[in-house]
Image (cartoon, helix red, strand yellow):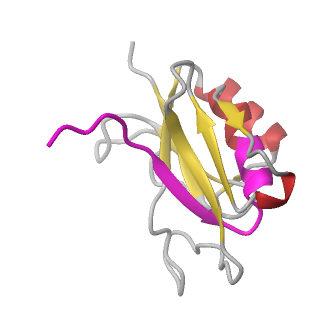
Amino acid sequence: MKIHNMYTAIDCENPRVLADFYAAITGYELKLPASDESQVWLELIDSNQQVKIAFQKITIYQAPTWPEGDFPQQMHLDFIVDDLFKAEVEVLTLGATKAEFQPGSPPHDEYEYEFRVYLDPEGHPFCLIASKH
């Protein structure tokens, strides 16, 4: 078996809001469906037209609770960045919320890299990870 591409699909209440948010973070292009009414599945594509992240509308969506709770995170995305402080300002400006619990910041021996946890506009956790040059 040969896999030609792999991507993550994220359940959400409003695919367009989440797709726009992650397009701004990643620089990926939002691939819009032919019909504006069918925005129950949206995709972000890279410069090679490969799907990288998809967003699926769920009518009974429940935001994850993090780090624990009735609806644990189920999945999260990690983004490696050159400047953790600058990236934090950018994602907060785009609508992210900094999570209260921060296991990887400040850095300590348990983790190889410093990272910070945020919640996207629909509550999915994601991390910004400091690049080691």
Q: Residue at x 49, y 47 (%)?
A: 77
The foreground one among 38 and 89 is: 38
Q: How many marks?
A: 0
Outermost left residue: 1
Judge whether 120 appears above or below 127 on screen.
below
Q: Residue at x 76, y 33 (%)?
A: 89
Q: Residue at x 71, y 79 (%)?
A: 59
Residue 126 on image: x %, y %:
55, 50
Whether residue 22 is visible, yes or no, is yes
Residue 74 on image: x %, y %:
45, 69
Judge whether 28 appears above or below 92 on screen.
above
Is 23 left or right of 94, judged from the image as shown?
A: left
Outermost top residue: 133
> Which region is colored magenta?
1-21
| Image quadrant assignment for residue 37 | bottom right
Judge whether 71 appears above or below 117 on screen.
below
Whether residue 117 is visible, yes or no, is no
Q: Residue at x 50, y 68 (%)?
A: 73
